[in-house]
Amino acid sequence: MPANLPPQYFEVEKLFREAKNPLEKIAALEEMLAIMPKHKGTDHLRAELRGRIAKLTQLAAKKSGARRASMVIEKEGAAQVAVIGLPNAGKSQLIAAITNASPPVAEYPFTTHQALPGMMEFENIKIQLIDTPPLVPQALEFWMPPLLRRADALLVMVDLSDAPLEQMAAITKQLKKMRVIIGEGGAEEDPEFTTWHKKALIIGNKLDIDRADRNYAALKAKSEGQFPLIAISAAEGAGLEELKAKIYEVLDIIRVYTKAPGKKLDPTDPIILKRGSTLADAAAEVHKDFRAKLKYARIWGSAKHDGVMAKRDHVLKDGDIIELHL
Ligand SMILES: Nc1nc2c(ncn2[C@@H]2O[C@H](COP(=O)(O)OP(=O)(O)O)[C@@H](O)[C@H]2O)c(=O)[nH]1
Ligand SMILES: [Mg+2]
């Protein structure tokens, strides 16, 4: 047993021993892995934990899909975004308003116990949003930390009819326990442990309520420069189009269209890349062998002139059209 394992580790190890099914075991092992300091002394143990996770994952996959669905949500569309917040912020209302899913919305708290995905259309792409249970200790599900760590971005929803700064403090406190950090700077990071930095958009909801304006101003004053933010009314539908655009923006992705030489492009089927990606990255996205095979490409959009030849390290922009030559 390597030295210097934090006390937290043994707490989770206890949870692991008490776990009743493979999924709970996996969650506990993932947690142990995340808590464990990364150094030579723990190499062996980390490998062992990863091996156990792999075995249990195989086992879990063989069992019925129903419970698994609540933990691991396969990514669909251009990106996966989790909507988080305290009870009654309006998370489910938002999911119902801007996606094809219809989670239950209710005025009593703790209506949502599961993670429920829905697809949001934005221009010519779809983005997956996930409704989640409230981020409070008493409602914390074992699968929440891995779900949030896997998401491409987090939408942090606060209720503007109530003290928003306190909600933000409570939310970031819960996130910190999961070693998820949002925003620029802010929370200090313990270099000994793995932390997950997530892009986040703060959504002030219930703008339709009287004191919402004032509360939003306070939230904005505190958060500006640290997070992008927006005020909406999920119930009345205010600000939802602007919200979709902001979700796209915070993901930091671009759409690039490929066309075959002499053919027209398909404007409904862009490839999705991280901002800063190059032509070679785009080629690899089309086919894994294309990164190596790519000789040059013609490009319309971000090059100086339309249709010129560009090199493989050319950095692409949103909306570029490329013609790959292998
Ligand atoms: N006034 C107002 N009420 C809202 C709005 N969005 C949600 N609500 C209400 O807030 C309560 C909680 O909503 P819900 O979506 O279930 O919250 P969740 O717990 O975050 O999923 C429900 O009574 C909703 O009708 C909004 O934009 N304005
Ligand atoms: Mg809900």
Image: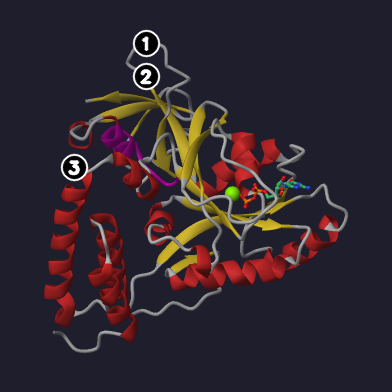
Distance Cα–Cα, label 2 vs label 3: 40 Å
Establish if 296 lies above or below 31: above
Tag 1 residue: 263
Q: Residue furthest right?
A: 210
Between residue 19 and residue 239, name the one nearer to us.
19
Q: Residue at x 30, y 25 (%)?
A: 324
x and y, in percent, of residue 77 in the image: 43, 34
Distance Cα–Cα, label 1 vs label 2: 6 Å
Tag 2 residue: 259
Q: Residue at x 43, y 68 (%)?
A: 178
x and y, in percent, of residue 35 in the image: 31, 75
x and y, in percent, of residue 196 in the image: 40, 64
Query: SS of the residue at dot 3?
Result: helix
Between residue 198 and residue 212, name the one nearer to us.
212
Tag 3 residue: 62
Q: Nearer the viewer, mark 1 or mark 3?
A: 3
Residue stretch in magenta: 275-285
Which image quadrant is residue 296 in? top left
